Amino acid sequence: MRALILSLLFVSALGVATHAVGETTGEIASEGQIVARIQTYLRGLGTLRAGFIQIAPGEPLAQGELFLKRPGRLRMDYNLPNPNLIIANGQVLAFFDRELRSRTVVDLADTLAYPLISDINALSDDYRVVRTQVSPDGLSATFISRTQPDQGQVTLLFAAQDDQLILEGWMILDANGQITQITLTQARHGDAMEERLFSIYDVFPGP
């Protein structure tokens, strides 16, 4: 369970050129420019609701619904027969198995979901860019923790429309070399979201 939590990651299509940070590629050349552009997108994101498709090693393809409310809130509600539910409430990230009625909790800052949903300064303060992927239609950037480099890598994938970024998904390479991919579908921005969606205490009804 813990391995799945810590490998919460994003990607869609990786058929684009890969460049180390510092190479000149159109408008995006430096780590600072990449981070600034992503931060601008995240700063204006507010809420995001989308379907998702997950591909994880040794697991059947999974689908579900994602709710993201910045900063710090995330809910990934898996469709049956997958019993999983992932919730971040701003401080911790909890993994639920609704079939076993079990819960595993870790500090949000110790997961690779942190760069996406944390305070906007986390990308520049706590993470560094190690790789970019650029195409005429978008970009992706791979981040690694400055203080916990053995934690793994998280890659954020964006499309670009009218010079604006749109989050398409993410990919996580965990400490064991396993890759988990999340692709977002039918994303909507700006939906109102109640805090109860991100409560980790009301998942299992009854005694």
Image: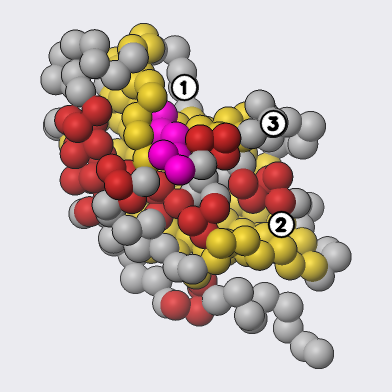
Which residue is disc 2 drawn over?
A: 84
Which residue position is annotated with label 1? 13
Outermost right residue? 100
Nearer to us in this view, 1 or 101: 1
**Residue type marked 1:** Ala
Scheme of image coloration = secondary structure
- Please name the residue shown 49% across and 56% down the image: 109
Residue drawn at the location 73% of the way across and 78% of the way down: 204
Q: Is residue 17 above or below residue 162?
A: above
Along the line of sight, the residue nearer the viewer: 101 or 80? 101
User: In this view of the protein, can residue 207 be seen by the observer?
Assistant: yes
For marks 1 and 3, give the CA distance.
Answer: 22 Å
Q: Earlier in the sequence, mark 1 or mark 3?
A: 1
Report the residue marked by disc 3.
176
Closer to viewer: mark 3 or mark 2: 3
Question: Residue 58's spot in the image, x, y percent?
Answer: 79, 32
The image shows residue 130 at horizontal and vertical percentages of 38, 24
Quadrant in which residue 30 is drawn: top left
Identify the residue at image location x=40%, y=71%.
Answer: 193
Q: Residue at x 23, y 45 (%)?
A: 39
Q: Position of residue 99 (x, y in %)?
A: 83, 64
Q: Amino acid at mark 2?
A: Asn
- The circle on residue 108 is none
Q: How many marks?
A: 3
**Mark 1 neighbour density, 10 Å: few (under 14) some (14–19) many (20 or more):** few
Q: Which residues are magenta?
A: 142-147
* Alpha carbons under labels 3 and 2: distance apart: 21 Å
Is 125 included in the stretch rendered in magenta? no
Q: Is residue 157 visible?
A: no
**Which of the two discs, 1 and 2, labels the residue nearer the N terminus?**
1
Judged left or right of residue 63, residue 67 is: left
